Amino acid sequence: MSVAYDTEHPIPMPPILWDNMGFWEGIKRHELVFQKCKQCGAWLHPPRPACPKCRSFEKEWAPSKGRGTIYSWVTYRNSPHHSFKAPYSVVLVKLDEGVRLVSNMTGVKPEEIYIGMPVEVVFDDISENLTLPKFRKAV
Amino acid sequence: MSVMRSIKNKAAIVGIGISNFSRDSRRTELYLACQTIKAALDDAGLTPGDIDGLVKQTDDASDEHAITSSMGMGNLTYFGESRWGAAPSAMVMRAAMGVAAGVANYIVVYRSVNGSSKRRMIPSMRSSGQMSTADLLQWTFNAPFGHMSEAGRAAMIVRRYMYEFGIDGDQFGWVPVVCREHGAKNPNSMYYKKPITMNDYHKSEMVVEPFRRLDYYEEADAAAALVITTAERAQDLKQKPAYILGAAQSMVTDTEALNSYYRKNISALPEMAQVGKKIFSMAGVTIKDIDCAQLDDAYGPFVPMQLEALGFCGKGEGADFCREGKRIRLGADLPVNTSGGSLGEGHIHGMNHVIEAVRQIRGTSTAQVKDARLVLVASGAGGPASGLILGGK
């Protein structure tokens, strides 16, 4: 089971800023990329102007293997927005690179989700303008 | 040259005003603000002409100049603001700093919001041009996945906390049960004479798992105001002063408003821990000296987490501390949220917690702790935080 959308109401678009543009450009071409500090090598998410560990402004967009585990999750039994049909779950995935990402699961019922569940990224082309990184149970 | 090392004992809360809590005030927020400020001034024995400083909550719709003009305040020399659920204690700190530094003599701190009748704006309803950078970043990575309610964002942290310490979600029910027990005694509460049982909690609807409806606040229309002046001036006014012995704010790397998902450990409240350290050392007291605590209960499960952060119990022991209310209800070693707080009195973004702390010091609470001398207030759980220790002397 995945998130069911009410097509009458579009999903709120992620506001794209210069600081996070690389992330969404990656998603568009089905590539999960995160900011990586060129100086100390730290993986950074959410993207920011500088590395909070070494304060360097030199960063690159580095590809993630897209594998990780569920770190936490919630299930919305009431929908806070017209476009999302409850129930649906929102997961916080801990990628193997160490960064965490808020996302949704695909092909998994809310009651099947557990902390530590191995997952891998998939790309959901929702519309011409929006692709979202989601996760499925990893084998 | 003399240097002011600390604002300990330099300022006091000398006036309090609070409206009723309703689902539809049928008044503007400005009207509610003015009416409540008037009540706080009457309580202190002051007039609007005495007021030369204002501190507002950043999101408050009632601007300083609207208040000044409506109330006929003739000469404002200081105005400032504080943000988030962390605002109430921080606003008091800001006012205490203002009077201690001598930039103003009598400062009003206020908050007024028609949270129920005029739905508070969620970011989706704002244009991106009006959002702050941090809000935009947060929205970018939350909204497209439907992660849009504050309760949902808080619940994500709480789920991890439950996992790490093996806490059964049912244990969180003791927080609303005790808050409602206290609120049931308070005629100003939305829940006056309406206590709940654990059975009610278990039957309460799962809104965003693991949160039930009773785990978090209901929106309300309400306003609250405080008057703060120097410790010397306080002695000449009508009420027994509530002296500010400790006051602090905290923010650290990776603090996000109800969204601190990206730091090493998300199942603790490091900002509140920092606030605790600072207010205890500033006031020169320990947890044993605290007679009651007014904690941020906008999200009930953050109460045990605050008890841990502030050092009232060990890590992972907060839920047990709240179990059956034995340690947190009136008469116990640490009565918590004696007016009812957000869950048991009403939600005015934590301002009623400060007002209740003042009542405890005065001895006028509807759930009075016998001989309460020191009261702790915590504002802002799950993000930027602030806190106070108030004392009668």
Image (spheres, grey):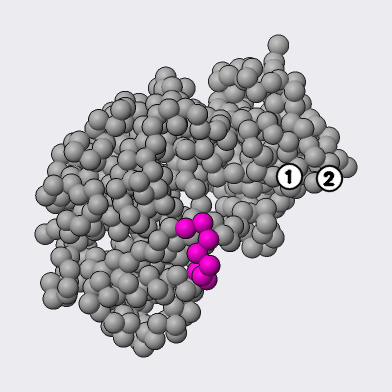
**Magenta region includes residue A22:** no
Disc 1: which chain?
A: A
Q: Label 1: few (<14), some or many (≥20) within 10 Å?
A: some
> Is the same chain shared between marks 2 and 1?
yes
The amino acid on which the numbered mark 2 sits, given as a three-letter code, is: Glu
> Across the whole image, how many numbered discs are drawn on residues?
2
Residue B355 placement (x, y as % from top left): 30, 58
**Which residue corresponds to mark 1?**
A82
Q: Is residue B217 left or right of residue B392?
A: right
Q: Based on the picture, tell me whether residue B27 belongs to the magenta stretch.
A: yes
Q: Residue at x 65, y 23 (%)?
A: A110
Span shown in magenta = B22-29
Foreground residue among B131 and A112? A112
In the image, residue A117 above or below residue B105:
above
Name the chief secondary structure element in magenta: loop
User: Residue at 22% of width from left, 68% of height from top?
Assistant: B14
At label 1, the amino acid type is His
Regarding mark 1 in the picture, which secondary structure is present there?
Answer: loop
Helix or strand or loop: what does disc 2 sit on? loop
Mark pair 2, 1: CA separation: 9 Å
Q: Is residue A2 shown above or below B53?
A: above
Splitting the image into 4 quarters, where does residue B178 fall? top left
Classify the position of the N terminus of chain B by image quarter: bottom left
Residue B7 placement (x, y as % from top left): 22, 63
For disc 2, the marked residue is A8
Which of the marked residues, 2 or 1, is nearer the chain's N terminus? Answer: 2
Identify the residue at image location x=58%, y=34%.
B208
| Residue A59 visible to an observer of this rendering | no
**Percent x, y of residue B254:** 49, 43
Q: Chain of mark 2?
A: A
Mark 2–mark 1 CB contact (< 8 Å): yes
- Residue closest to the eye, B3 or A87: A87
